[in-house]
Image: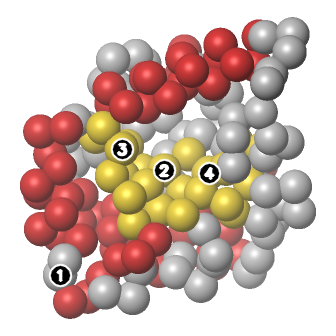
Amino acid sequence: MSPRSKARTCPRTPKNGNTGPRRFGSISIPQRKDTLPRFSYDRFVQRSSTIDVIWFNERGMPHTFFEVEHSTDIQNSLLKYHELQDFNARMMIVSSGARRQEYEAKRDYPAFQEIKGRLRFLDYDALARDYERALEESQRETVL
């Protein structure tokens, strides 16, 4: 799903607001619990309200979950994803490239084998490049 799709994005700014090269608020809209779509049972909606960013598809279902892990334990995000595994959604960990090995080690724990195929790591630099590229494409009059 591209940023140009009609997906709804509901980010929740991390406690320190830091997402690496830019503050998250500069490229997203703030999430309020009352604006999070009621896409499932209350316990799943409540649990997903702790996810930093959720992209929703045109049917109002989660398409991609993003957890920004600047300094907190990546395993906590993987545990959240494990609880939300019944949703057909991608599960992204966004962090510094220096934390990739930590992510890979924890992703390989036996407890996360059921979701391992949907987990992805996105470092801050790649996120910034993807965002800038999508922004440029959205401003073109004609896209080939």
Mark 2 and mark 4 in contact? Answer it, CB < 8 Å: yes
Residue placed at 63% from the left, 24% from the top? 134
Please indicate whether residue 51 sits to the left or right of residue 38 in the image.
left
Give the Cα separation between the discs numbered 3 and 4: 15 Å
Q: Earlier in the sequence, mark 3 or mark 4?
A: 4
- Which residue was labeled with disc 4? 54
Q: Nearer the viewer, residue 35 or 121?
A: 121
Secondary element at image label 3? strand
Q: Which of marks 3 and 2 is nearer the N terminus?
A: 2
Q: 10 Å neighbourhood of mark 2: few (<14), some, or many (≥20)?
A: many
Q: Are marks 1 and 3 in contact (CB under 8 Å)?
A: no
- Gap in Å between the C-alphas at discs 3 and 2? 9 Å
Q: In this view, does 116 lie above or below 28?
A: below
Q: Are marks 3 and 2 in contact (CB under 8 Å)?
A: yes
Which of pointers 4 and 1 lies earlier in the amino acid sequence?
A: 4
Q: Mark 1 points at which residue?
A: 109
Amino acid under disc 4: Ile
Q: In the rendering, at what x and y percent does residue 32 appear?
A: 69, 41
User: Does the image show residue 102?
Assistant: yes
Whether label 4 touches label 1, CB < 8 Å:
no
